[in-house]
């Protein structure tokens, strides 16, 4: 009977580690979304377009996500910065009243304006994220070669 108890205890430890890992991943994902929102909130009073605080926080969020994601999750994280940055930019500019019109030519013009405003943050965040993912990939290849795999 002690062996069954030991197996149950080991399973309980694995389950608690898995829950803790899931909680940590959720907190990191929340932080990765909250950082660019905070950056655009800082930029809000200084002007209508997203500024350097937004770019910097988008880069930090992308690096954080790239450093903490799983190997399988890297495929999801790699596509996230443009979507996150564009969404935050659109919401911030709509809340700030930046477009003025929301129909016909006005929405098309607003979409171009949003894309132009968001591009520096998108490009910087994506470049930083890809650099971190490439460094992780190279490091994993080197360690696999050292271990003789």
Image (cartoon, helix red, strand yellow):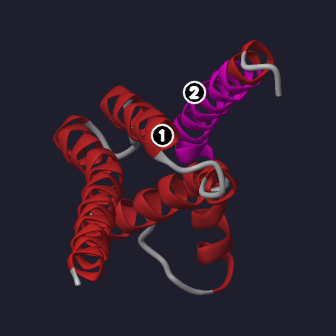
Question: Residue at left 24%, top 58%?
Answer: 27
Label 1 SS: helix
Q: Is residue 130 magenta?
A: yes
Question: Which residue lies most toward the front here?
Answer: 1
Q: Which residues are magenta?
A: 116-141
Question: Residue at left 71%, top 29%?
Answer: 137
Return the residue at label 1: 62
Query: Is residue 20 or residue 90 the one in the foreground?
Result: 20
Quadrant location of the N terminus in the rendered image? bottom left
Q: Which mark is residue 15?
A: none
The image quadrant of residue 122 is top right
The image quadrant of residue 133 is top right
Q: Is residue 34 visible to us here?
A: yes
The image quadrant of residue 75 is bottom right
Return the residue at label 2: 128
Query: Is residue 124 or residue 112 the one in the foreground?
Result: 124
**Tags 2 and 1 in contact by the CB under 8 Å rule?**
yes
Residue 3 x/y as whole percent: 29, 75
Query: Is residue 60 or residue 52 the one in the foreground?
Result: 60
Q: Residues within 10 Å of mark 1 (few under 14, many from 20)?
A: many
Residue 12 x/y as whole percent: 23, 74
């Amino acid at each position: 009977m002690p062996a069954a108890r030991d197996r149950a205890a080991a399973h309980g430890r694995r389950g608690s580690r898995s829950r803790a890992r899931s909680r940590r991943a959720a907190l990191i994902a929340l932080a990765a979304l909250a950082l660019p929102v905070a950056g655009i909130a800082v930029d809000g009073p200084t002007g209508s377009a997203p500024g350097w605080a937004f770019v910097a926080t988008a880069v930090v969020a992308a690096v954080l996500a790239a450093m903490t994601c799983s190997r399988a999750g890297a495929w999801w994280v790699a596509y996230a910065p443009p979507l996150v940055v564009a969404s935050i930019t659109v919401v911030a500019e709509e809340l700030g009243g930046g477009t003025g019109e929301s129909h016909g030519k006005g929405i098309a013009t607003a979409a171009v304006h949003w894309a132009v405003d968001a591009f520096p943050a998108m490009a910087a965040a994506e470049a930083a994220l890809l650099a971190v993912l490439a460094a992780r990939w190279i490091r994993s290849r080197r360690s696999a070669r050292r271990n003789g795999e």
